Image: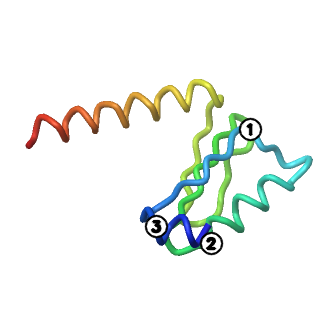
Amino acid sequence: MAEVAQKHGRSAIVECAAGVAIPTVRRLGETLARQPAATLVRINPRDPRAPTRAISIAAGALESINAIEACVTDLAISSKTAH
């Protein structure tokens, strides 16, 4: 993870529907997000709680990923038209 951040800048760990019953994925995401240039995005409709500096989304995975994609696309279009 540190190599990725060093090469490309910031990174995001997107965790979809990882519940609390089997916390393995949650722990991995939280561990990876401790890197200075990393942010955890936790998407879970039932238990979106996340550590400090993380982004919590209380919605379904597909709905959330589609919304994130739309925002990124809008930002990219805005960025191109601003130049």
Residue density around tag 2, few if under 14, some if 14–19, many if 20 or more, within 10 Å: few
Mark carried by residue 17: 1
Q: Earlier in the sequence, mark 3 or mark 2?
A: 3
| 42 and 29: which is toward the camera | 29
Q: Quadrant of the C terminus?
A: top left
- Point out the frontmost of discs 3 and 2: 3
Position above or below: 12 against 45: below
Q: Secondary structure at mark 1?
A: loop
Mark carried by residue 34: 2
Q: Quadrant of residue 12?
A: bottom right
Residue sitting at x 19%, y 36%: 78
Question: Which amino acid is tagged 1?
Answer: Ala
Q: Earlier in the sequence, mark 1 or mark 2?
A: 1
Residue density around tag 3, few if under 14, some if 14–19, many if 20 or more, within 10 Å: few
Residue 64 image position (x, y, % from top left): 55, 31
Residue sitting at x 62%, y 38%: 58
Q: Quadrant of the N terminus?
A: bottom right
Residue sitting at x 37%, y 34%: 71
| 79 and 65: which is toward the camera | 79
Residue at the left extreme of this rendering: 83
Residue 74 image position (x, y, % from top left): 29, 31
> Colour scheme used in the picture?
rainbow
Q: Do callouts 3 and 2 mark residues in contact (Cβ within 8 Å)?
A: no
Q: Secondary structure at mark 3?
A: helix
Residue 80 image position (x, y, % from top left): 17, 37
Mark carried by residue 7: 3
Residue sitting at x 42%, y 65%: 9
Real-space Cα distance between discs 1 and 3?
29 Å
Real-space Cα distance between discs 1 and 2?
20 Å
Q: Secondary structure at mark 2?
A: loop
- Point out the frontmost of discs 1 and 3: 3
Question: Which amino acid is tagged 2?
Answer: Arg
